[in-house]
Amino acid sequence: MSKGRVLITGAAGFLGSHLCDRFINEGFEVIGMDNLITGNLENIEHLFKLKEFEFYNHDVSKFVHVSGELDYIVHFASPASPIDYLKIPIQTLKVGSLGTHNCLGLAKAKNARIIVASTSEVYGDPLVHPQTEDYYGNVNPIGPRGVYDEAKRFQEAMTMAYHTYHKLETRIVRIFNTYGPRMRLNDGRVLPAFIGQALRGEDLTVFGDGSQTRSFCYVDDLVEGIYRLLMSDYPYPVNIGNPDEITIKEFADEIIKLTGTEQKVIYKPLPKDDPMQRQPNIDRAKEILGWEPKISRAEGLKITYDYFRSLPDEKLYKKEH
Ligand code: NAD
Ligand code: UDP
């Protein structure tokens, strides 16, 4: 018997597709929704044969209609790579604001619980390190990244308003850099960028002097944290990420070692407003969800490298940007 019906927006994307798998495996019926602006149906094509899975090709920034009952909404639709959201800034602002409003309205109409995908970007270029959930952030609203960061900050405000004024069951997950199979090789994020360069025999492009830091979480760990948060009764934001922090230069060196490439690191200008450091404080997730990441970077990178290596050459050489 089905555990319930879940709508997952952004279903054809990297994280959305892994969430579809998880909810199907848990025994839910899943409706995947996506307009394919940065996603790819290949990520969920294995689900199309299942009677527990349906797909709606729809832009969630426009009115969202789903017939029948809904128990949960998992709102993950939004470009996530800086290169993507700089290319489609207005759509990014719309999906974080109007898209979130539509999903909240649908949750209210169906009396469903909703979780929204927020981000470490709500902390901007943080002045508090590591970042705790009670830090308000340091975001430039009119800078290039503002279209993403402010949409996500608005998303959080709107979600809390529905919780407070409509007593809706809401959850907010603040996701830190996550990686794994099904990322697009050419989406511009640092991990696919470096592995793609290594596989093509190109030098690895480090932006700035490479002293900026990130903390990379393997996708299965993230999905576990999201699932636990949705099933919890906690309505305030929770950081989910791996606190194992590394500089981008060290990260490039790790990829060089992992792939055995003979190429070297070359330096390119640092994009404007690129955060200098980022590391989640996960005390809240540990305390409330009993969650912490289990997969080391070495293990996760190996799985992800094997995935990218298995892709056909046309994907490796496809230029998107
Ligand atoms: P992704 O680009 O792979 O997936 C996003 C999906 O949303 C795509 O399939 C895209 O086509 C779809 N989409 C975008 N706008 C839409 C719209 N208006 N209507 C319907 N579908 C739409 O990105 P991802 O890495 O899977 O990120 C998913 C979510 O997680 C995003 O909300 C992102 O902000 C958040 N997030 C991701 C990370 C990360 O490290 N991957 C970190 C922080 C937050
Ligand atoms: N970066 C880099 N080389 C690349 C792509 C990204 O040095 O080819 C840097 C980028 O400037 C940032 C970090 O890697 O400091 C992570 O970038 P990403 O786009 O993956 O995500 P962000 O955390 O900035 O949203």
Image (cartoon, rainbow, N blue to C red):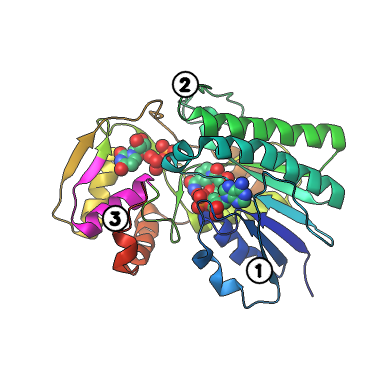
Q: Earlier in the sequence, mark 1 or mark 3?
A: 1
> Could one spot residue 98 in this view of the protein?
yes
Q: Which residue is mark 3?
A: 196
Q: Please tell me the numbered disc located at residue 24.
A: 1
Quadrant showing the N terminus = bottom right
Instruction: Classify mark 1: residues with Cα within 10 Å, few (<14), some (14-19) or many (20+).
Output: some
Separation (CA) of disc 1 from disc 3: 31 Å
Amino acid type at mark 2: Leu
Instruction: Classify mark 3: residues with Cα within 10 Å, few (<14), some (14-19) or many (20+).
Output: many
The percent coordinates of residue 111 (x first, y second) are: 86, 50
Magenta segment, principal secondary structure? helix
The percent coordinates of residue 286 (x first, y second) are: 60, 45
SS type, badge 1: helix
In the image, taking residue 65 as reference, residue 44 lies left or right, namely: left
Q: Looking at the image, which residue is at 32% across and 49% down?
A: 193
Whether residue 191 is in magenta: the answer is yes
Q: Looking at the image, which residue is at 44% across and 34% down?
A: 278
Separation (CA) of disc 2 from disc 3: 32 Å
> Could one spot residue 76 in this view of the protein?
no
Q: Looking at the image, which residue is at 19% across and 43% down?
A: 265
Q: Which residue is mark 2?
A: 127
**Relative to 128, residue 233 above or below:** below
Q: Earlier in the sequence, mark 1 or mark 2?
A: 1
Separation (CA) of disc 1 from disc 2: 40 Å
Figure label count? 3
Disc 1 or disc 2, which is closer to the eye?
1
- Ligand 1 within 8 Å of the CB at mark 1: no
